Image (cartoon, rainbow, N blue to C red):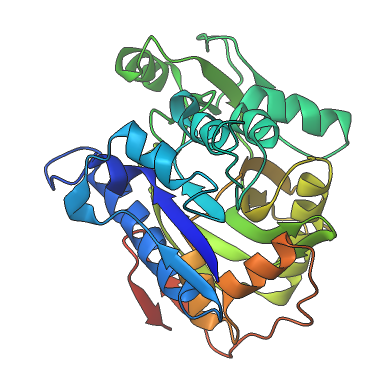
């Protein structure tokens, strides 16, 4: 029997549990991912999956460290924001020599690279992966607007701004957290999309690409997604996202790539935006149309085992960040 410990940061800490909290949306998102993944893992033969219950929050660090140790769990899957190095610190705790835990996820080094938006952009440039021009300087009134200003290690579009003119620049400068390192990025027009992968030692397997719904208030707040997308766009998304993950060593398990698909049919205006080295909300939609157990496939690919052809159900699904799913 393989024991898999699923640790989801928002629910384990209780952050955002209060509906009045500004983090409540991230709490609902985290809970939806955790519950869906644990349910799917429990349907895998010879696998026992468990997570901290909501009522146990906040979980003391010692509980996490004890539970992820090899004496308790065979594998630990961590779902946490990259902000303030939360995800990479938890990954390092799992793999600490004293605990000898095993991550069902990307290595700390891969998390460190992909969590740093400037370092990731520079890495992609070195490997000829199209991505918007990115710098760590502060925007000025002399920018070639529009531009995107966002935290260097952010998650969930927190403190992210689309700046289209000097007035919006002044508002962004006043609203952002001055203590957070930021990146300034070229704005590229197109359709927001993502492509998830199941990554393993023998290669990366793309899943069905997804459209992303983002708020139109200039803050890029995630509002769910829809899949599958048209076949021509899906082919472009998989082609670009495959290049984006292939040059990053240490990715393992479920990994998401955010993209912008431009308006040219040849994909010349498509850009990779960032890599999420962890489970993302697209899992909710993917498991709905999968004619297989996505969690079981993830376990097999992470272990270097073949899974054969992945089959998908007909139809189209829309899903929300809170885990709601409806067929279109």
The front one of 24 and 46 is: 46
The front one of 146 and 247 is: 247
What residue sits 63% from the left and 53% below the top? 255
Left or right of 308: which side holds 146?
Answer: left
The front one of 282 and 265 is: 282
What residue sits 79% from the left and 63% below the top? 304
Residue 228 in view in this figure: no
In the image, residue 64 sits, relative to residue 34, either above or below, namely above
Identify the image quadrant of the C terminus.
bottom left
Query: Most extreme residue toward the front, as rendered?
Result: 71
- Residue 74 position within the rendered picture, expressed as x and y whole percent measured from the top left: 56, 56
- Residue 164 position within the rendered picture, expressed as x and y whole percent measured from the top left: 47, 27
What residue sits 71% from the left and 81% below the top? 310
- Residue 187 position within the rendered picture, expressed as x and y whole percent measured from the top left: 60, 33
What residue sits 30% from the left and 45% below the top? 12
Picture quadrant of residue 133: top right
In the image, residue 237 sits, relative to residue 226, either above or below, namely above
The front one of 53 and 163 is: 53
- Residue 302 position within the rendered picture, expressed as x and y whole percent measured from the top left: 71, 60
């Amino acid at each position: 029997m393989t024991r898999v410990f699923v640790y989801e940061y928002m629910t384990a800490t209780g952050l955002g549990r209060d509906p009045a909290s500004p983090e409540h949306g991230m709490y609902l998102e985290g809970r939806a991912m955790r519950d869906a993944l644990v349910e799917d893992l429990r349907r895998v033969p010879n696998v026992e999956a468990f997570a901290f219950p909501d009522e146990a929050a906040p979980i003391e660090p010692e509980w996490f460290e004890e539970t992820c140790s090899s004496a308790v769990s065979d594998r630990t899957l961590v779902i946490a924001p990259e902000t303030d190095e939360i995800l990479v610190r938890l990954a390092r705790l799992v793999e600490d020599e004293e605990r000898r835990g095993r991550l069902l996820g990307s290595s700390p080094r891969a998390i460190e690279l992909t969590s740093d938006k400037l370092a990731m952009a520079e890495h992609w440039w070195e490997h000829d992966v199209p991505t918007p021009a990115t710098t760590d300087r502060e925007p000025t009134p002399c920018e070639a607007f529009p531009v995107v200003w966002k935290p260097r290690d952010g998650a969930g579009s927190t403190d992210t701004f689309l700046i289209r003119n000097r007035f919006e620049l002044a508002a962004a400068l006043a609203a952002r957290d001055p203590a957070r390192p930021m990146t300034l990025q070229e704005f590229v027009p197109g359709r927001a999309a993502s492509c998830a992968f199941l990554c393993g030692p023998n290669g990366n397997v793309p899943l069905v690409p997804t459209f992303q719904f983002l708020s139109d208030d200039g803050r890029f707040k995630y509002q769910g997604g829809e899949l599958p997308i048209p076949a021509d766009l899906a082919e472009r998304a998989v082609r670009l996202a495959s290049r984006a993950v292939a040059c990053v060593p240490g990715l393992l398990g479920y990994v998401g790539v955010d993209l912008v698909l431009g308006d040219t049919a040849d994909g010349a205006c498509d850009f990779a935006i960032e890599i999420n080295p962890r489970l993302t909300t697209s899992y909710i939609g993917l498991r709905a149309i999968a004619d297989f157990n996505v969690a079981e496939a993830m376990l097999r690919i992470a272990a270097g085992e073949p899974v054969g052809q992945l089959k998908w159900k007909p139809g189209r699904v829309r899903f929300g960040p809170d885990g709601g799913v409806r067929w279109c």
